[in-house]
Image: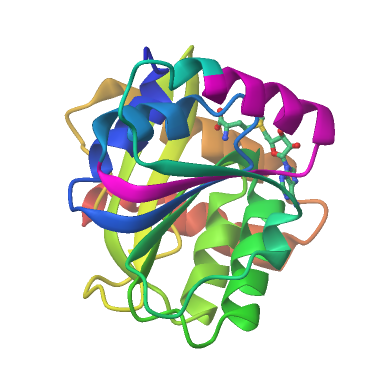
Amino acid sequence: MKLSKRLNVINSLITQPLDIIWDCCCDHGFLGMALLERGIAKQINFVDIIPQLMEALEQSLQQFEQGKSLPSWQVRCEDVAQIKLPTDAKQVIVIAGVGGDLCLKLIEQIIANNPHSLKQLSFIICPIMHLYKVRAGLKDCNLQLDSEQIIVENKRFYEVLQVSFNATGTITKTGAHMWDTHNPQHHQYQQQLLDHYTRMLNKDRLYYQKVITEYQHVFER
Ligand SMILES: C[S@@+](CC[C@H](N)C(=O)[O-])C[C@H]1O[C@@H](n2cnc3c(N)ncnc32)[C@H](O)[C@@H]1O
């Protein structure tokens, strides 16, 4: 299964055997399929809210599994916010390719609905935009940082974060561990963020000036 760079990075972050991986907002299901092929989890759950997509994915997976011995899988057409997690399973929830606001809302609702399943749970996320706000929200949920990195794919910048309740790293709003001062692309990303938040200044000067100041200092840590 050939994956995009973004999905490939997420795939490679999953190194430990797991009970369940949730490929949430899965659309085409490519990530979950790659994970199925690797056999890294006992079960892969594909979740998306669009029935036609899920019907097509169910058929693709049936063909994909022909002649192979894969772990078990489920295609679930439902709102990710409503998923019910088993309490005693080691599981990873992946949410990639949706906006930052939606990504955070889904995480908040999953946590609120599954208070007894959080010990062995981790999230790998790659939202589109609004990472400052997402990171602030993750901190408010008391999540901790396992890893974070910047990815460039088709000239667009993404952040991939791995977070859980057992991790020991602190989540910072601008990403304390992902900036490499020797990487020109990271400077480009910083500039893009500064330009974006400068355009936002007229909406809430006090708040966005603080965001800009924080992004101005990311290479100084
Ligand atoms: C752009 S695709 C992302 C596909 C893949 N995860 C990736 O990163 O390439 C976004 C998907 O999120 C799904 N989605 C949006 N909100 C959702 C929700 N609340 N519950 C389940 N799926 C949702 C959409 O139906 C769409 O298929």
Q: Which residues are magenta?
A: 40-62
**Residue occupying image coordinates x 25% and y 32%:** 38
Quarter where residue 211 is shown: bottom right
**Quadrant including the C terminus:** bottom left
| Front residue of 23 and 5 | 23
Asked if residue 45 is among those painted magenta in the image, a careful observer would answer yes
Looking at the image, residue 125 sits to the left or right of residue 60; the answer is: left
Name of the residue lying farthest toward the bottom: 116
| Front residue of 192 and 151 | 151
Report whether residue 186 is seen.
no
Quarter where residue 107 is shown: bottom right
Asked if residue 55 is among those painted magenta in the image, a careful observer would answer yes
**Residue occupying image coordinates x 28% and y 56%:** 18
**Quadrant including the N terminus:** top left
**Residue occupying image coordinates x 37% and y 78%:** 88
Percent x, y of residue 127: 56, 44
Indicate the quadrant of ligand 1 in the picture: top right
Number of numbered markers:
0
**Residue occupying image coordinates x 43% and y 79%:** 118
Q: Relative to residue 80, is residue 188 depicted above or below?
A: above
Q: Relative to residue 162, is residue 194 depicted above or below?
A: above
Percent x, y of residue 56: 71, 21
Looking at the image, residue 207 sits to the left or right of residue 147; the answer is: right
